Amino acid sequence: MPTLDAKPVLPQAFRRLWWATGIDGLGTGAFTAAVPLLTVTVTHDPRLVSLVSTAAYLPWLLLALPAGALADRHDRAGLMWRAQAVQAALVGVTAVLAACGGIGIPVLVVMAFGLGAGDVVFGTAAQAILPDLVAKPALPRANGRQQAITTITGQFAGPPLGSLLFGLAAALPFGLDAVSFALSAVVVATLPRRTRKVPERSAVKEGVAWLLRHRLLRTLAVLLGVNTFCGQLANTTLVLLATQVVHLSARGYGVLLAGAAAGSVLGGLVNARVVTRIGALPALVTALSANVVAFAGIGLSPDAVVLGVVLALNGFVTTLWNIVTVGLRQQLVPAVLLGRVTSVYRLLGWGLIPAGTLAGGWVAHGLGLRAPYLVAGAVRGIALVAVLPVLIRAARQFQVSRRA
């Protein structure tokens, strides 16, 4: 892997993307806290709570591949702002329904699916556009900045604000999210435009073939699938663990999410240095090992303080995983294929999330609200042991290429 500059330059176009990410993240963070709180006012059944989360992630299974083809064939900035404009309209309608008392599980499911579809288009194009804006040596720093602002606004500032607004009126956090989507779309629309000529007949097939030939990225995609399945299995009923087992209020739940996000914020700011110092793949193994421990700790947490600390540790190492894996894709995949390979990668990596959310609801219903984290930690540990030989071999290959 190439040596990173001490202070790689981040251009003005990246700063605009960074601002758009922060604006969007604030509203999304408020929305993230408000949706489960609104859901538990309708039902306490873990299976129905998990159904809303399932609907939010189902588009990754259904739409990931065509979204990647779109990101390689069309202007990525244009796709991003149009997706956010649609999301703004959808959340605005939800805010009106919440104000009128017309919210039920079916409405929440439809709303979650629509926003998830927008996230598929926006997220795929956003990762693919970054190498268009930033030189390769600066990608770890840029990804770290993106992770940091996403966490600061989406997990640190947004959830407490969403909880506070929800306490005042159920519609307020949804209105805030609609405004944030609209403002972010305006900023994204100012990014540089670039399109590529991609033959339609080879669009999806070429991305699939490239990823299947690359052993390291193929392995990481499968491992991501296991990890996200486990993450959703555990986290889909976190609101019930926090409010019914640890006995937090709605405002306390927002503070818990903000405290947990502190680890992710720190990770976004320092993990690029960690990757530079110890190497990408050793950092990856460290992150995966710590995730296993963190999941077990969350499931066994005796009170809100311990729960918040272990969630913060999990956020820190999850950010480390994100910076390493996103950076590897951006550096190893040819630019003309990046959207399609990213979509295939995320299909493999996120396609099991709907199954994870449903499984989490049933595990919590049958074994208790602590059980999902313990089960998820055990499965992640087994998966890490299974892929460790591939990661070790890849790390040695990187060392040889560096010496050469």
Image: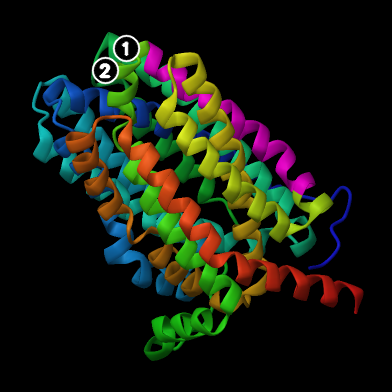
- Asked if the magenta segment contains residue 384, the reply would be no
Q: Position of residue 28 (x, y in %)?
A: 40, 34
Magenta range? 252-274
Question: Which label was assigned to residue 247?
Answer: 1
- Residue at the image point whose x is 38% and y is 49% from the top: 230
Label 2 CA crowd tier, 10 Å (few <14, some 14–19, many 20+): few
Decide if residue 26 is in sight here.
no
Q: In the image shown, does 269 or 240 lie closer to the viewer?
A: 240
Disc 1: CA contacts within 10 A as few (<14), some (14-19) or many (>=20): some
- Considering the numbered disc 2 on the image, is that residue within a helix, a strand or a loop? helix
Residue depicted at 16% across the width and 45% down the height: 110
Q: How far across and down, in percent of the image, does residue 189 sit?
A: 50, 51
| Rendered view: 368 above or below 293 | above
Residue at image point 35% right, 15% down: 246
Q: Is residue 270 left or right of residue 357?
A: right
Residue 273 colored in magenta in the image: yes
Mark 1 belongs to which amino acid?
A: His
- Give the residue type that dot 2 points to: Gln
Q: Which mark is residue 244?
A: 2
Q: Is residue 337 visible?
A: yes
Type of secondary structure dominating the magenta stretch: helix
Labels 1 & 2 near each other (Cβ < 8 A): yes
Marks 1 and 2, how far apart at CA? 5 Å
Measuring 90% from the left and 79% from the top, which residue is drawn there? Answer: 404
Q: Position of residue 274 (x, y in %)?
A: 77, 46
Whether residue 403 sits left or right of residue 98 in the image: it is right
